[in-house]
Image (cartoon, rainbow, N blue to C red):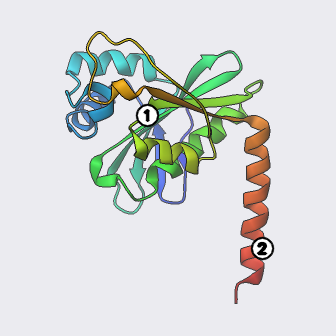
Amino acid sequence: MSEVLETKRMTLRPITMDDVDLLVALDSDPEVMRYISGGKPTSRAQAERILQRSVGHRWLGFERATEEIVGWFGIRLWTAKSRELGYRLRREMWGKGLATEGALAVIEVAFAQPGIDRVRAETMAVNTASRAVMERCRLRFVRAFHLEWDDPIAGTEHGEVEYEITKAEWETHQRHDFSSEAERRRDAP
């Protein structure tokens, strides 16, 4: 999965070890890290370890109009037949639909792989913005659950949530979305 992806408003290029400074900058915003580390920044050493594990299944997104970094989008191995969706955006990019746009692009990559029949994602139950992205990507709620944490952050007492979409569901939505778009174009003045 080393291809460059194009969406309506972004270019997503594969992440490399040279991107450590971009990851450190992204993870230095306490609001970006609120539901990940309780707002604590990622150190350079941590970022390097994360990048080593991320090459091959994570992309950096850049706005095409401005060439500004949006954030990252990933689709990593979960099981032999499933992948896990992840994303993290700069706060300045929140609320523009870019998380949904990038997530849809990497979900499409996942389902293009032979044998992949499920994409899942999880977040803290209180992370309503991330949950909304999952829902806009047509993932459906599967379950709520609680994990034990050595150093719990605010909101962990409400648990975690898991969402998923199957390949069959994805294909059904893609056909529906395509036919709806064709109808809108046909009915346009």
Image quarter where the C terminus lies is bottom right
Residue at left offset 39%, top offset 63%? 65
Query: Observer-nearest residue: 173 or 9?
Result: 173
Q: Where does the image place residue 118, in percent across and percent down from the top left?
A: 69, 29
Residue at left offset 28%, top offset 53%? 92
Point out which mark residue 105 bears.
none
Disc 1 crowd, CA 10 A, few/some/many (<14, 14-19, 20+): many
Task: Identify residue type, mark 2.
Answer: Glu
Taking 78 as reference, is 183 above or below it? Answer: below
Q: Where does the image place residue 78, in percent across and percent down from the top left?
A: 59, 18
**Side of 166 relative to 3 (left or right):** right
Select label 1 or label 2 by which is in front. Answer: 1
Disc 2 crowd, CA 10 A, few/some/many (<14, 14-19, 20+): few
Taking 117 as reference, is 109 above or below it? Answer: below
Could you tell which of marks 1 and 2 lies nearer the N-terminus? 1
Residue beneath label 2, please? 183
State whether residue 102 appears in this view. yes
State whether residue 33 appears in this view. no
Q: Quadrant of residue 50?
A: top left
Task: Identify residue type, mark 1.
Answer: Ala
Residue beneath label 1, please? 125
Image quarter where the N terminus lies is top right
Q: Quadrant of residue 142?
A: top right
**Label 1, label 2: how many angstroms apart (C-alpha)?**
37 Å
